[in-house]
Image (cartoon, helix red, strand yellow):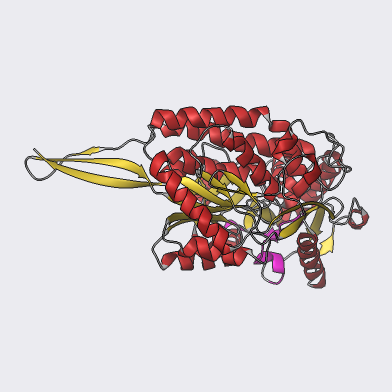
Amino acid sequence: MAFTSGSNVLLKNIPYQFKDVSLLDNRAYIGGKWLPAESVATFPVFDPEDNVVIFRVANLTDVEVHKAIDAAQTAFLTYKEFSHRKRRQLLHQWITIVKENRDDLAAICTLEMGKPITESYVTVDYGLSFLEWFEGEIERLYGETIPAARENNRIFTTREPQGVVAAITPWNSPIAMILRKVGAAIAAGCTVVLKPAPETPMCAIAIAKLFERVGYPAGTLNIVTGDAASSPNIGNEMCRNKLVRHLSFTGSTAVGKFLNGECGKSLKKTSMELGGNAPFIVFEDADIQKAVDGLISSKFRSSGQTCVCANRVFVHRSIMSEFAEKLHATQKKIFVYGSVWDPKVNFGPLYSSSGLEKVKKHLEDALANGATVFDKTSIMENQGPNFFPPTILLNCNTETMQFGSEETIGPLAPLVPFDSEEEVLRVANTYESGLASYFYTENISRLRRVAEALNTGMVGVRVGLVSACEQPFGSVKESGIGREGSKFGVEDYTNVKSITVGI
């Protein structure tokens, strides 16, 4: 297997012509150099639309990750001295270059994750919005002057970059998740070692190619790639290496708990965005069509594969039939299936066969425990090996069915009836998860009351989307630690230093 960049890295023909084929590379990026795995090992990346291998990428070990962390530390000693204005100018150049290569980035996202191309443009633009926000935040990392209790003392604070940041990103929105983590850390003055998901490494590689053109110190951003088998060793190195001062992870709760525990051994700062299991509540006084539209956005966007997807849909018993009918009719009208390269298509395959199997498992479990499919003909639709159609389930129960305690990560919408506000809040507020929640009501008193009662980091009230660059994105309980986006996303990568001066 040759390690290189260019058109020969892509192993199948696709209906898209890359404008800059140099963005395709199968090597890691360490210390400003593009390097193969020292063992020359590679791992395959599959096209979810047909399960064909599209790339083979360098499969690194923890030894190479150690070298990447060393390179990031060396770069940090230089980069941390850059003025805020200079950091802002560099980030602005990176934003410009990313915008110029928007088409190719969207195409890579479609290739690796199976997103319809129109949706891939959305995730690129979403990621860009964070970079633009962080650019503005760079020069707003203010300190404070604090009145001192002791005479002749003066106290002030500064915000300083933490150092080397290790970032581990998921497959489900690769461009946006990479830019959201890396952009914030770079804006704060940190350097980064990024481990992308094994399913979507080429998005990270392409972003690094564009980053390289800006002129940051070599080693400011490093990309270490590895398959599922090598990921634990890579993660262990990131947790245990004393040069890493912050580990940012988005992924499963189980892995997040492990990484957080390992980082705790050296009191390393962490930020964790973990499992969601979001409740979506429709009260009897809701505008039903607006609630349906909100659920379409929340549940079925990206084929149901986002961490903030509605997972448990609670509908007041008195409006259940009407809601289900309108949801089915709207779904049938909105979704267009076909090739993910067709701009008219807006619903694609799941990211892998393992993702498909989990959705099927939740469907079979629900049916075995009394649920029914609203429209059985939808199950027969087939658009490829990893395709699962939007499916509505009736007669569901969160206490007896797996979806009640596990994220489905797919387009399965189980509708659970409820009779009272007290009842639904009790069930919606689980002990473990607390990322996002949604509800629809026209009662202004209930609006404020339920928003405060839902125990999640983010609440959508009469909206199905709760994420934006200016908004703090994060959770409570076992769904995570810290915030991404907003001013807090950049501040999270800084340390507050208190300075006392005698005069």
Question: Which residue is located at x 64 percent, y 67 percent?
Answer: 405
The quadrant holding residue 393 is bottom right
The quadrant in which the N terminus is found is: bottom right
Q: Nearer the viewer, residue 106 or 436?
A: 106
In the image, residue 138 sits, relative to residue 320, either above or below, namely above
Q: Nearer the viewer, residue 416 or 501?
A: 501
Q: Is residue 487 left or right of residue 400?
A: left
Q: Nearer the viewer, residue 448 or 353?
A: 353
Q: Is residue 4 left or right of residue 339?
A: left
The quadrant in which the C terminus is found is: top left
Q: Which residues, given as a range, are shown in magenta?
A: 400-421
Q: Is residue 147 left or right of residue 138?
A: left
The quadrant holding residue 132 is top right
Residue 164 place in picture, x, y as percent: 45, 50
In the image, residue 61 sits, relative to residue 30, either above or below, namely below
Q: Is residue 151 left or right of residue 333?
A: left
Residue 166 place in picture, x, y as percent: 51, 54
In the image, residue 206 sits, relative to residue 372, either above or below, namely above
Q: Nearer the viewer, residue 338 or 60?
A: 60
Answer whether residue 473 is visible to the viewer in this image. yes
Q: Is residue 418 magenta?
A: yes
Question: Which residue is located at x 58 percent, y 66 percent?
Answer: 233
